[in-house]
Amino acid sequence: MSTLSESSTAPTVTTPVSERPIGVFDSGVGGLTVVSAIQRLLPHEDIVYLGDTARVPYGNKSPETIIRYAQQDVQFLQSQNIKAAVVACNTATAHALEAVRQSYAFPILGVVEPGVEAALAATVNGRIGIIGTTGTIQSGAYQKALLTRRPDLQLTAQATPLLVSLVEEDWLTHAATHLILAEYLAPLQAARIDTLVLACTHYPLLKGIIRSILGDEVKLVDSAENMALALQSRLKQDSLLREGGQHAGRTRIHVSDLSPHFAPLAKRFLGGRVGAIDRVRLES
Ligand code: DGL
């Protein structure tokens, strides 16, 4: 097992790398759906979360800007002595995953691949729908990854830019949300999809209302759950999984802007206790 020397002056104490935290970042609060899935699957792991709330949304920004922001986000996580990083933002994964992977030596996982694998496993009729931010859909990242594996698939990709704001407003069951979703999902229904990829951190919170429109026969692929599974297998493969023991994993939340709105929203995304939230300054 690889180890890290804690200090050169103190008596030599070595901490296994596997006991370092996992870093997770998103453009804002939405990535906490991924944190929640990681907490459920890997309860012994410590997590450091960064939400770039000062610069959210990423979904309508240019690829160059998203890459710059993502580099700074990972740089912050690296300063927290992490063992691996998760890009919990679909837009940042779509545009910046390759760039950040080239800059850092620790494993960096994105949400696109796990979602693609799950969609391939779920579809029976080969008709898959994808909904996400304008940036994610325009990047073509999901479409390319799916068609590389199965060129015969029929894909219907739909940018759904209004949904992030509706979720942030807590309009999860609101009639207006139903109306907007029905409009967005109509082309996917017409294409007779049997699987829908929820290609945005915020959308797992809309599963109920999406099901009420599409019915139970359409399988919903949730990037949060699939990301946690992919992380587990990568940590295992790299001998970085923390041994269970008595340790109860802790999650520390950092944001680049802290408004009064954040803590209640974070609680809803995390589905539980939030603890202290630190404001950090990211390079701009
Ligand atoms: N986190 C973003 C994503 O998953 C949604 C919010 C944003 O546009 O920044 O694509």
Image (cartoon, rainbow, N blue to C red):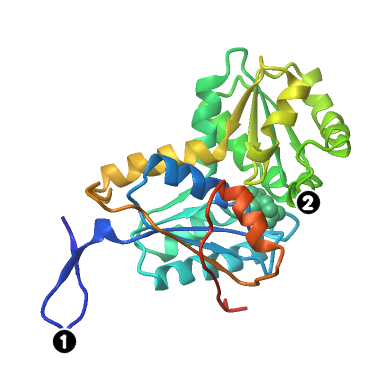
List x then y, in percent, for residue 68: 59, 68
List x then y, in percent, for residue 150: 54, 24
The three-letter code of the residue at mark 2 reads: Glu
Say which residue appears at 51% left-offset and 62% top-offset: 275
* Residue designated by label 1: 9
| Cα distance in 3D space between marks 1 and 2 | 51 Å
Q: Is residue 281 above or below residue 111?
A: below
Task: Using the rendered image of the protein, determine whether residue 28 is visible from the camera's viewpoint.
Answer: no
Cβ at disc 1 under 8 Å from ligand 1: no
Locate residue 74 relative to residue 125 in the image: left or right: left
Say which residue appears at 28% left-offset and 43% top-offset: 236
Mark 1 lies on a secondary structure that is loop
Label 2 environment density (alpha carbons within 10 Å; few <14, some 14–19, many ≥20): few
In the rendered image, the residue lying farthest to the bottom is 9
The mark closer to the camera, 1 or 2, is: 2
Label 1 environment density (alpha carbons within 10 Å; few <14, some 14–19, many ≥20): few
Q: Which mark is residue 151?
A: none
Q: Nearer the viewer, residue 251 or 15?
A: 251
List x then y, in percent, for residue 166: 79, 47
Looking at the image, tell me whether mark 1 or mark 2 is earlier in sequence order. 1
The three-letter code of the residue at mark 1 reads: Thr
Say which residue appears at 70% left-offset and 68% top-offset: 260
Q: Is residue 6 above or below residue 19?
A: below
* Residue designated by label 2: 169
Say which residue appears at 54% left-offset and 35% top-offset: 115
Point out the image quarter for the N terminus.
bottom left
